Image (cartoon, rainbow, N blue to C red):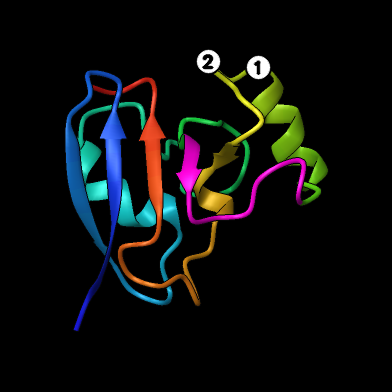
Amino acid sequence: MSKTFKCITRSGREFDVKYSENDNIMIALYDHFKGEPWGDCGGSCICATCHVEIIKGYPTRPDMKLDEQEEYLLEDAHNETVSSRLGCQCDLRGIESNTLVVKVHHID
């Protein structure tokens, strides 16, 4: 049985995203955003095109300390908030189905 989380785009479109235990948020959303600026570096944490805002269901600042590289990239990300994360750095292992909600501010 596959697990899902909810994604909300800039225009307010909402959809469920299927994922497996081995995915991260960037990988899980990759096929949904073909042709868009998404995951351009392939998950190497060097481009910030997989920037998401965690609405609920995943650790964010100030409750956790981000990796220095992720923090640096998020400083220049469009619509960066205290709940911002890079999808490539958000492992979905152990995340229960239907508990995670993310918003992608740069894609409709």
Q: CA distance from mark 1 to mark 2?
A: 7 Å
- Examine the structure image and report whether residue 59 is included in the region drawn in magenta: yes
Quarter in which the N terminus is drawn: bottom left
Q: Amino acid at mark 2?
A: His
> Residue at image x 41%, y 66%?
23
Q: Residue at x 58, y 40 (%)?
A: 85
Q: Residue at x 20, y 37 (%)?
A: 34
The amino acid marked with disc number 1 is Asp
Q: Which residues are magenta?
A: 52-63
Q: Which residue is mark 1?
A: 76
Q: Nearer the viewer, residue 12 or 108?
A: 12
**Quadrant of the image containing the C terminus:** top left
Kindly identify the residue that appears in the image at 56 percent across and 41 percent down.
Answer: 86
Verify whether residue 98 appears in magenta. Answer: no
- Along the line of sight, the residue nearer the viewer: 1 or 75: 1
Above or below, 63 relative to 79: below
